[in-house]
Amino acid sequence: MPADYTPATIADVRRLRDALEQEGKKLVFTNGCFDLLHAGHVRYLEQARALGDAMVVALNSDQSVRVLKGPDRPLNHQNDRAEVLAALRAVDAVVVFDDERATTLIESIRPHVYAKGGDYTVDSLNREERIALENAGTEIRILPLVPGRSTTSTINKMLGGNDTCTGSLRIAVLGSGEGSNLRAIIAALQSGALNAEIALTLSDQADSNFLKIARASGLPAQFVDGGSNPRRLSDAAQKEIFEHLERARVDVVVLAGFMRILKEPVISAYAGRIVNVHPSLLPNHKGANAPQLSIDAGDRETGCTVHLVTAEIDAGRILAQAKVAVLPGDTAETLHARIKIEEHKLLPQVLNEWRERGLPVRGAVTS
Ligand code: GAR
């Protein structure tokens, strides 16, 4: 039997880099866990390799993967992961590193180009890594994520998750406020009307009733500091949310009164798997304060919408709607309270349908 694969050493890679430089060529550096290789990885590595003339992949050791991804990972031993990676056309060398960060490696290797997957932005790169890259004169390139392909979704399929339409749907519920929709989902789970598992609840408001309900129900609950702008999430918060979702092996992300705008990397990584509940009959009255906008517009009828989330606010595909009459003398509060009664039925219904038949394709339903 052939001996186990031996990864390259830092000295090997530094020699490769210097030899390339003498010929006016460039070494590309990238890093990651590459636990279960899939087409998304291969495409990403091909794109990264095209930025220079040779590429080294710094592979997280088993110990650092455990720190980053949780105790169940990696699935494959570091030398096996290195061997599979090294067999790819795009990869010229693989080094294994033990830290969570690649700072020391960057300082020793001084690559010409540093490539990173699109779950980062230049601003959300680790500060130390970024300083090491700047000191080495390395060009930083962020490459887009390949949507719909991830180690987590592959693992979920193997475990009989949503992708195979069997087993229970693992959902994450994100909210900022009162948490009445979260309570409705929990009630639907308890009554058996919804067969799913809340794998994560997450809020940008530390003192929210939403988090209190989650904790009182014994659910995994996370607070993420979104930053100073109440409608936006800082790049660091976007990334932190992504990491929580990945760790919880979530099939579907449910925005139940989450009042900040989700962007990359979550939007691409969970494309077609993020739903939002909104208190109007979209496309009418997008954004905040929809019940008040309905009253101001003189609507005689409004309602709620469950829709897919895309980069454009409240504009993704409509999955289901319920109508609510606007009554004479309604205030935003009285109207919103009646809309919520419909939301509490509609959201669990959409999620259950999703579990049973895959993504719902229905148009409007009425109350
Ligand atoms: C819900 O009415 C939901 O539709 C709305 O926030 C409320 C949250 O209530 N969402 C939006 O306005 C998003 N644009 P809850 O915290 O009691 O579930």
Image (cartoon, grey):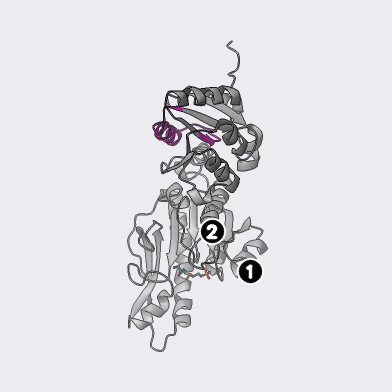
Disc 1 marks which residue?
Answer: 207
Q: Quadrant of the image for the C terminus?
A: bottom left
Residue 165 in view here: no
Mark 2, Cα crowd under 10 Å, few <14 / some 14-19 / many 20+, is: many
Q: Residue furthest bottom?
A: 329
Is 40 situated left or right of 124 in this image? left
284, above or below 64, in the image: below
Image quarter of residue 64: top right
Please tell me which residue lies in front, 353 or 117.
117
Image quarter of residue 289: bottom left
Magenta residue span:
30-54
131, above or below 58, in the image: below
Label 1 CB-ligand 1 distance < 8 A: no
Identify the residue at image location x=63%, y=65%.
206
Is 74 situated left or right of 318 in this image? right
| Secondary structure at numbered mark 1 | loop
218, above or below 154, in the image: below
Residue 275 position within the rendered picture, expressed as x and y whole percent measured from the top left? 44, 58
Which is more N-terminal, label 1 or label 2? Answer: 2
Residue 225 position within the rendered picture, expressed as x and y whole percent measured from the top left? 59, 61
Are the residues at dot 2 and dot 1 in contact (C-beta closer than 8 Å)?
no
Q: Quadrant of the image for the N terminus?
A: top right
**Residue type at mark 1?**
Asp
Mark 1, Cα crowd under 10 Å, few <14 / some 14-19 / many 20+, is: few
Residue 183 in view here: yes
Disc 2 marks which residue?
Answer: 173
Residue 290 position within the rendered picture, expressed as x and y whole percent measured from the top left? 41, 74
Is 188 situated left or right of 291 in this image? right
- Please tell me whether mark 2 or mark 1 is closer to you in this view: 1
Asked if the magenta segment contains residue 349, the reply would be no
Residue 5 position within the rendered picture, expressed as x and y whole percent measured from the top left? 58, 18
**Residue type at mark 2?**
Val
